[in-house]
Image (cartoon, rainbow, N blue to C red):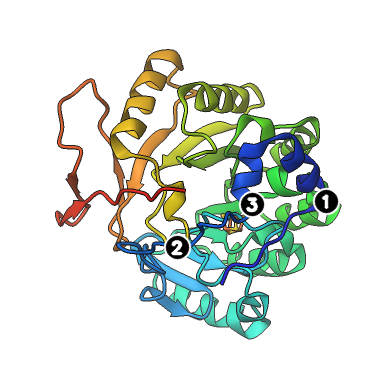
Amino acid sequence: MLATRLSPYLEKLTRKCPAIQREFVPTKNEGQDETGTFDDPLVEERHTVTRGLVHKYGNRALVLLTMNCAAYCRFCTRRRKVSDIERGIIRERDLNNMVKYIKRHPEIKELLFSGGDPTTVPAILKRALQKFTKLPQIKIIRVASRLPASNPKMVNKQLIDALKVVKKQPLYLMIHFEHPEEITSDSIIAVKKLQKVATMCLNQSISLKGVNDSVEILQALFSKLIEIGVKPYYHYRCDPVKGAEHFIVDFKREVEIFTKLRTRLSGLATPMYVIDAPGGAGKVPVPLNFWNFDHKGYRDFKGKKLTVVEGRQD
Ligand code: SF4
């Protein structure tokens, strides 16, 4: 059960912007109709190889360092366990077990630190980075952070010092903004601090009904991001996760929005629009309406036929 948490910074922002409020404050219909959705749509539990380490794609692995976040997003893909802080605590022996597994799998070249928000636990993040960046097989480090949007003041010296541990590998910071009004003067200061230590800052966003399901809002979001030096990377169709059904946008409408956006934004400002196929078989790019295609079904990376999951009323 996903807890409710807002930072004092977000509390102010949610009072000004109903769309941001919807991201973090539960509505009465949350979890009312969960048919066709999943606790774990990306089957991460099945691919958990040792506590905190998910190995689903050959050359890269996901490190889940915590289930803590500065604020909890109601649409979180990991809402089955995010906010269960006790369950998520990663200890030294867990990190050592991860190192052992990675060494036994030399095909793993890239590590993505996520959670929860790994940048809310800088001491653990630092310890993990110290261990993993020493492994010669690791060529790329990615760290996800929602802090510039959820609590920018937490992008502090302790966090920056932790990130500075990464010296040999390129460090990609995966930031998470969903709405242009999340990009405030405080969040820009936080992003600038991260840019000083990161090789590149990228943004991941999600289509969310009632939050950003409009051409104008997404155009403003992606334009602002590129102006502050953050490359819009992936824009996801909302995962069919239990409790987040009311965020799923009508698929035809979503494709129409993205088709219009493509005519308005530069290539640099346009993220790749994808469906993260339920079952964990790849982030499948969605074709736009410049081509004729079937809006009901698609195939994942393994060739399996899948049906698009539609949302619920809210
Ligand atoms: S910050 Fe990330 S992990 Fe935390 S609730 Fe939001 S989406 Fe989930």
Q: Which residue is mark 2?
A: 32
Q: Residue at x 62, y 30 (%)?
A: 180
In depth, the one of 215 and 53 nearer the eye is 215
Residue 228 sits above or below residue 125 on the image: above
Residue that appears at 37% across and 63% down: 42
Q: Which of the two marks, 2 or 1, is nearer to us in this view?
A: 2
Q: Amino acid at mark 3?
A: Phe
The relative height of residue 76 versus residue 1 in the rendered view (above or below) is above
The residue indicated by pointer 3 is: 24
Q: Report the amino acid beneath label 2.
A: Gln
Residue 107 in sight here: no
Q: Name the image quarter holding the N terminus.
A: bottom right
Residue 280 visible, this orientation: yes
Check if mark 3's residue and mark 2's residue have beta carbons within 8 Å. no
Q: Nearer the viewer, residue 130 or 254?
A: 254
Where residue 57 sits in the image (x, y, percent)?
Answer: 34, 61
- Label 1 belongs to which residue? 8
Label 3: state its secondary structure.
Answer: helix
Q: Residues within 10 Å of mark 3 (few under 14, many from 20)?
A: many
Marks 1 and 3, how far apart at CA: 12 Å
Compute the Cα span from label 2 to label 1.
29 Å
Task: Please say if 185 is above or below 208.
Answer: above
In this view, 154 is above or below 44: above
Q: Residue 237, position in %: x, y? A: 38, 44
Query: For ligand 1, which image quadrant applies?
Result: bottom right
Q: Quadrant of residue 20?
A: top right
Q: Position of residue 148 (x, y in %)?
A: 71, 43
